[in-house]
Image (cartoon, coloured by chain):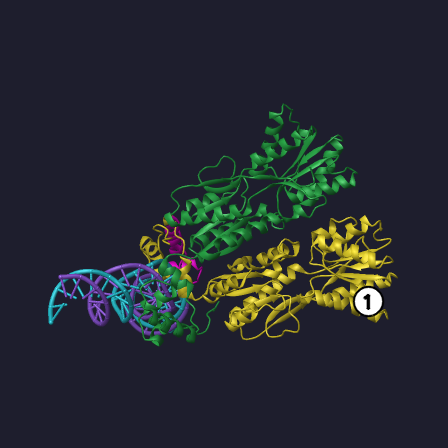
Chain colours: A green, B yellow, C cyan, D purple
Amino acid sequence: MGRRRPGTPTLEEVAAHARVGRGTVSRVINNAAGVKESTRRNVQRAIEELGYVPNLAARSLAGRRADAVALVMTEPDWRQFAEPFFSEIVRSLGDALTDTGIQLLLTLVRSDAERQRFLEYARGGRVDGVLLMSVHAGDRLPDMLAEARLPTVLLGRRSGEEYVSYVDADNIGGARSAVSYLLRQGRREIATITGPLDLYAAQCRLRGYEEALASAGLEFEQTRVAESDFTAESGRHAMAELIQRHPDIDGVLAASDTTAAGALEALRAAGRRVPEDVAVIGFDDFSLAQRTEPRLTTVRQPIEEIGRAMVRLLLEEMEEGAVAWRHVILRTELVIREST
Amino acid sequence: MGRRRPGTPTLEEVAAHARVGRGTVSRVINNAAGVKESTRRNVQRAIEELGYVPNLAARSLAGRRADAVALVMTEPDWRQFAEPFFSEIVRSLGDALTDTGIQLLLTLVRSDAERQRFLEYARGGRVDGVLLMSVHAGDRLPDMLAEARLPTVLLGRRSGEEYVSYVDADNIGGARSAVSYLLRQGRREIATITGPLDLYAAQCRLRGYEEALASAGLEFEQTRVAESDFTAESGRHAMAELIQRHPDIDGVLAASDTTAAGALEALRAAGRRVPEDVAVIGFDDFSLAQRTEPRLTTVRQPIEEIGRAMVRLLLEEMEEGAVAWRHVILRTELVIREST
DNA sequence: ACAAAGGCTGGGAGCGCTCCCGTATGGAGT
DNA sequence: ACTCCATACGGGAGCGCTCCCAGCCTTTGT
């Protein structure tokens, strides 16, 4: 396993070449104050001439930080990997980290062996903090990270959990306002396609659906609920099933825009018009929602804010050493288009 | 930016606690030979009691290796991120790396600033090698990595390029055999939906299409070619266009299974039967191909082999220090199902 | 002209490991 | 009993940086 790379110049060599001390070179590459402008230029020229690149292992060791954070996806999320939610989140986290000088590393954790390996990687100090994608109920990873006192922020909380930092959207409120909107339109036969119910977010959206029905004095019926896994495929399936069970259906709240797109296809196949016969509301408001036919009314998740909030919380925790838990719930918003 | 974590035990402390020398502890944690079984157990107990985790920065610095490789996606690939090809590749790379003890890190490079930052990260020694997802024609990243003498393996070559290692599927052969198959069935009005033509792989598949027509003595017509970006959406579009241009169309080779799925929808919408009126062949053979209606005939890319080959090439390059370029072209295979 | 107060700079002391050489230790061979 | 060798083990010498203190040199005030 000899993986050394050939003679990279060191900081010391740069210092010699520029006829200054190590300290000065260090100050220059770290943009620290207290270096005369002429010296700085001189050092910078030396850096360029030698093609110097700081050795990050040495910097990490001496500085006790990695300047990197990991975004972890655990196995059950893997199926979401191909869904737009994921790529949108990555994009927004990337943006939020842009000018912190912190590298974002995506890591997959698909088995216990990989969980263990990642833990060693993180505890070994290769990252300063961890962002976790929507973690499922039974996953012990957050606890393991907490035990190791690694700054951690979850995207989406888990049921009732308080002793961990998280950023979440107001799923209950979003679902409630969507269903209430349908009710105000005079729809009465409203069903819902949920996400995987081991995800707390999916449970919350279902709760919002129930609450809206309840406050309109309507009864909740289990047969109006179909579960999906967020894919279009499963949305189509779920919708077909709901139509069969309740031919008089006139409104649907879907688990995501993708699911809603699948539902639209199933409705078209069944000869129902949208929105005349059946109103459809999605969840997320990603670009897909504007490309369906008809364009989708949907509950917007503020992705940019979620990314920014996650990064802010993580940086704060990194600063102070994971001594407090922070929670941020972001408001969702109903975006009305043509499917209602 | 004080991101230090509290008193983690060091190897030295473990050594003291187990009453052995540093060297012995090092040998134990690295599973090196030459430690008496009783000593090993003794040290292991000390490690456990103190909850010791090796500091990877120190290990990296002393050992001159990072035990990590990066899988990089550049901006133009980003749109593929949500496609199954990507997640399949990641899965197969992960499997191939499983028992090497090497961490796979996914990184996004969406702008020149991020390109630069990643380069510093890699040149700084945080990874021992780089895997690059299908790189587009103009991207300078591979050259920059080569210049830094970082072991690099591309997935999918770029036009005519030799001075870089890559693993690729035989796209020309795959496309050719698919189209030949359609011709043998007696189809004569065959069109193709290509991928983005700035991708060499897409060009190759188009070439295969052309070659098959040529060797059957048929003429190539530009109007039978429609470009897609690998998404179902764009596949639907392209197919609709092709139907309009050539109502007598009786066979289509699509750029990917996803594109083919889109094409199937467009054909259904146009009232064409598959395979009776029009035969459809996809490319990739991911799970999607078995879930379409009808199930898709498709050109299989050997994903597992691709992942294994990429990892093998990268490890070889890491071993010997990027002094040679290796190329692997993997055979593709036509999988016949119901859409032809 | 002299003192005090800054601003710059150099370099020692680690950070926590791996590598490797030198030295113990135990058993086999005669 | 003594030599010889293989096997275990200890610890010095870095790896390339950051942190920080001490010293120098310039500036300003009186």
Q: Amino acid at mark 1?
A: Glu
| Residue B203 belongs to magenta span | no
Q: Residue at x 51, y 61 (%)?
A: B114
Residue C9, placed above or below residue B277: below
Q: Quadrant of residue A283?
A: top right
The percent coordinates of residue D21 (x first, y second) are 22, 61
Determine crowd level at label 1: few under 14, some 14-19, many 20+ residues with C-alpha closer than 10 A.
Answer: few
Which of the pair D27/B113 is nearer the observer? Answer: D27
Residue A278, placed above or below residue A307: above
The percent coordinates of residue A300 (x first, y second) are 59, 42
Q: Which residues are magenta?
A: B24-48
Magenta-highlighted stretch: main secondary structure?
Answer: helix
Mark 1: secondary structure: loop
Q: Residue at x 77, y 50 (%)?
A: B265
| Residue B40 belongs to magenta span | yes
Quadrant of the rendering where the C terminus of chain A is positioned: top right
Question: To which residue does mark 1 refer?
Answer: B221
The percent coordinates of residue B111 (x first, y second) are 54, 61
Name the subunit of mark 1: B
Which of the pair A147/A169 is nearer the observer? Answer: A169
